[in-house]
Image: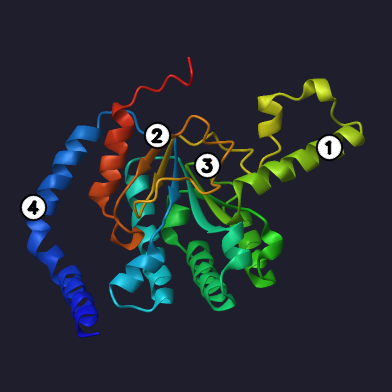
Amino acid sequence: MFIKWFKRFTKRLTLRFLPFILKPVYKLYEKYLWMQIESGPIPLHVGIIPNGNRRWAQETGLPILEGHVYGYEKLKDVLKWLWELKVPYVTVFAMSTENCLYRSRVEVENLFNIIRKGLVELLNSNEIHKNRVRVSVIGRLEYVPSDIKDLIRKLEESTASYDNYFLTIALCYGGRQEIVDAVRSIAHDIASGLLRTDEINEEVFSKYLYTRNIPDVDLIIRTSGEERISNFLLWQSAYSELYFCDVYWPEFRKIDLWRAVRSYQKRERRFGR
């Protein structure tokens, strides 16, 4: 028991003081990375799977639910960094369909509370309106509490005319479920005489997806060392570049983002040609 406590204590101590010790070195390295990427191609659309909040909390001796709070605060930083890069489209995997249905009610309610707070902050954010960020929420919103659906509607309406940046929040979302919903809509339109089967192609199919108004994702970043996309943007990620980062999401730094972009810039994108 003592050894376990001591490990947690030393890790928390390290996390608290190490950034101050390494800050000068970190700033130099950040500048070095920026010089490497600033003139290269910037992805049009970045997808983020912010994984590792619970494990980070456990390893730092915090309650698991606190991990999600820290993860939310980190997301605000990362969005600012992406907008500094002039990345126009960002999609964040906030909560999967499986999270909504199968995690404990306590954890799901905690996540919904964080989402409520986030939506209110976005609605009242000077930065969102100054930068003209259009916000959309996609997923099986029938699983979402009614007050959150009201907030989503208000946020989407208040940013509907913006066209500088596009933030998509995937909430109670699953890539397979999205494809199933698209097939259902296509079948309905065929039965109604609005669509013929010989008209269906990739372009037409894409128009039935939740993401019908945004381009396919160029770069997907997943934290925590897990190397899978976990049902995230399955159709849209057919030719995405994937970047898996070993750090937990609450520890994600600007240099980690810059490294992901540097990796993206070094890859030759031929789209199967």
Q: Which residue is mark 2?
A: 43
**Position of residue 192 in the picture relative to residue 25 (left or right):** right
Nearer-N-terminus badge (3/4):
4
Of the residues tagged 2 and 1, which is closer to the observer? Answer: 1
Of 133 and 248, nearer the camera is 248
Label 3 environment density (alpha carbons within 10 Å; few <14, some 14–19, many ≥20): few
Reading the chain from its start, which is encountered first: label 2 or label 1? 2
Type of residue at label 3? Asp
- Tell me the SS state at disc 1: helix
Q: Circle 3 sits in a helix, a strand or a loop, which is it?
A: loop
Label 4 Cα crowd, 10 Å radius (few <14 / some 14-19 / many 20+): few
Would you call the spot at circle 1 few (<14 residues within 10 Å), some (14-19), or many (20 or more)? some
- Residue linked to disc 4: 25
Nearest the viewer among 166 and 62 is 62
- Residue type at the position of mark 2: Pro
Q: Relative to 181, does residue 23 appear above or below in the rendering?
A: below
* 177 with respect to 46 (left or right): right
**Location of residue 233 by image quarter:** top right
Q: Could you give the CA–CA distance between mark 2 and mark 4, rounded to whole angstroms?
A: 27 Å
Mark 3 and mark 1 residues within 8 Å of each other at the beta carbon: no
